[in-house]
């Protein structure tokens, strides 16, 4: 995968949600098809931490059920870094191995989004707008 398509309106939802969750990381599940995000499932960070996030098993299961009902796939994981750049941390890279989808990170400092996939290491991919 070389890019993921994320609408400007979805970026606004994700950035506002991230700002509202400060000082903690925000998180969510991204649904879609063909590398295009079509829906967002905002989730709770049960870690309540500014440097880590965990989506509960209940919300993960709910997210996959919603995706199935909407005939979409889980194509990405979203989270914010309230106090750092939008690059995967070592913890993120560890969890990217068990969740091999696109990870979109929002920086609370730069107010920008970056998308990453894990190959042998984290690889940044393009975010295209529609």
Image (cartoon, rainbow, N blue to C red):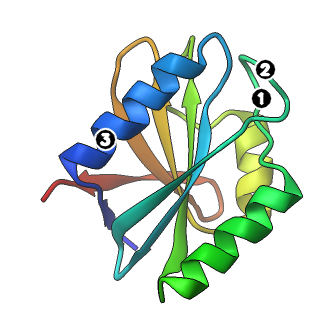
- Mark 1 neighbour class, 10 Å CA radius: few under 14, some 14 to 19, many 20 or more: some
Task: Name the residue beneath numbered marker 1.
Answer: 52
Q: Quadrant of residue 47?
A: top right
- Answer yes or no: is residue 85 visible: no
Near-viewer residue (97 or 25): 25
Q: Is residue 2 above or below residue 54?
A: below
Q: Earlier in the sequence, mark 2 or mark 3?
A: 3
Near-viewer residue (65 or 48): 65
Total marks drawn? Answer: 3
Q: Is residue 113 above or below residue 70?
A: above
Task: Name the residue beneath numbered marker 2.
Answer: 49
Q: Which structural element holds mark 3?
A: helix
Placement of the N terminus among the 4 image quadrants: bottom left
Distance from disc 3 to disc 1, alpha carbons, whole Å, reads: 21 Å
- The residue that appears at 29% across and 35% down in the rendered structure is 12
Task: Name the residue beneath numbered marker 3.
Answer: 11
């Amino acid at each position: 995968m070389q890019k993921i398509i994320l609408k400007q309106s979805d970026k606004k939802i994700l950035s506002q949600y991230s700002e509202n969750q400060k000082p903690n990381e925000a998180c969510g599940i991204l649904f879609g098809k063909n590398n295009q995000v079509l829906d967002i499932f905002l989730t709770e960070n049960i870690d309540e931490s500014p440097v880590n996030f965990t989506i509960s098993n209940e919300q993960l299961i709910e997210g996959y059920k919603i995706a199935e009902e909407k005939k979409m796939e889980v194509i990405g994981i979203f989270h914010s870094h309230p106090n750092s750049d939008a690059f995967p941390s070592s913890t993120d890279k560890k969890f990217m191995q068990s969740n091999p989808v696109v990870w979109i990170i929002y920086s609370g400092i730069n107010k920008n989004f970056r998308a990453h996939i894990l190959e042998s290491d984290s690889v940044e991919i393009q975010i295209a707008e529609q």
